[in-house]
Amino acid sequence: MTDKILSTAYREDVNQTELPLDSFAGPDGDAQLAAIIESLALVSEEGVSIAAIAEVTVTSVERVEAALLWHDEAEHRGVALHRHADTITVSSHPAAGAYIRRLLKLDREAKLSQAALETLAIVAYQQPVTRGEIDAVRGVDSSGVLANLHNRGLVEALGRRTTVGAPIEYGTTVEFLRLFALNSLDDLPALGLVDGRDLDSALEAAIAGAGEHGEMVPPAEAEPAETAAQA
């Protein structure tokens, strides 16, 4: 809906003022376009697509990509731009977090439990992933932790897998990018070890094992109640 509104506004404005094809070709072009992208993302509650940005700014998708790259590498910005698929959203810059909490008189943000961080890491690095695959890697029932992460807006259902039982596949959200101060999933750090195991290899092995029996993975023990509640 926001993309349509922006496109309509663009068509109305361009009738009044014709802009050159590349309006941001000068030495400060990337900075100027990045500032406009900040504004467009700010007024778009659900985010704005890269195609819509290119249309309303009368420039190319490549120029928008260049401006986004400039913004990622720029210092002393007040806001951060996050890319989820081809949608751009905006949030306050993580560097300003302490000042914002002080202004709004907020306590420090609640920390995620170890169980939540482990589950979130599996989803982030291996998405789309099913709950059965998460359980197989962790060795415990992750339904409670996964539900809490979903309620906090950090993971979302992406659809159903076309296998036995049609299990739900999960992925991370824009809120996940904001929480961990990531511009996109490409900024995720290299995988490390979880409980002495290589997470990437463990998950691939678990997925292969689960795939042999559809979604019938070995029964997992229940997540401790107090751990799941902290997620």
Image (tube, rainbow, N blue to C red):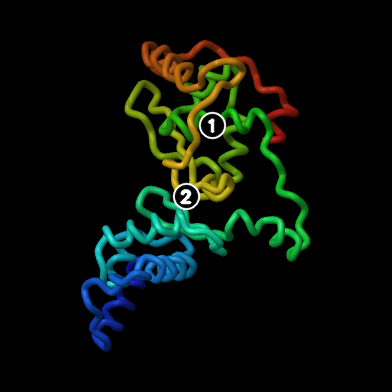
Residue linked to disc 1: 121
Q: Residue furthest front?
A: 27
Element assignment for label 2 = loop
In the rendered image, residue 185, in percent from the top left (x then y), is placed at 44, 42
**Label 2, label 1: how many angstroms apart (C-alpha)?**
17 Å
For the residue carrying disc 1, how many other residues have a C-alpha within 10 Å: few (<14), some (14-19), or many (20+)? some
Residue linked to disc 2: 183
Amino acid type shown at disc 1? Ala
Q: Quadrant of the N terminus?
A: bottom left
The residue nearer to you, when weighing 152 against 182, is: 182
Q: Is residue 96 above or below residue 161?
A: below
Q: Which mark is residue 12?
A: none
For the residue carrying disc 2, how many other residues have a C-alpha within 10 Å: few (<14), some (14-19), or many (20+)? many
Q: Is residue 51 above or below residue 27?
A: above
Q: Is residue 214 left or right of residue 18?
A: right
Amino acid type shown at disc 2? Asn
Residue shown at the point (60%, 54%) measured from the top left: 94
In the rendered image, residue 179, in percent from the top left (x then y), is placed at 58, 47
Q: Is residue 124 above or below residue 60?
A: above
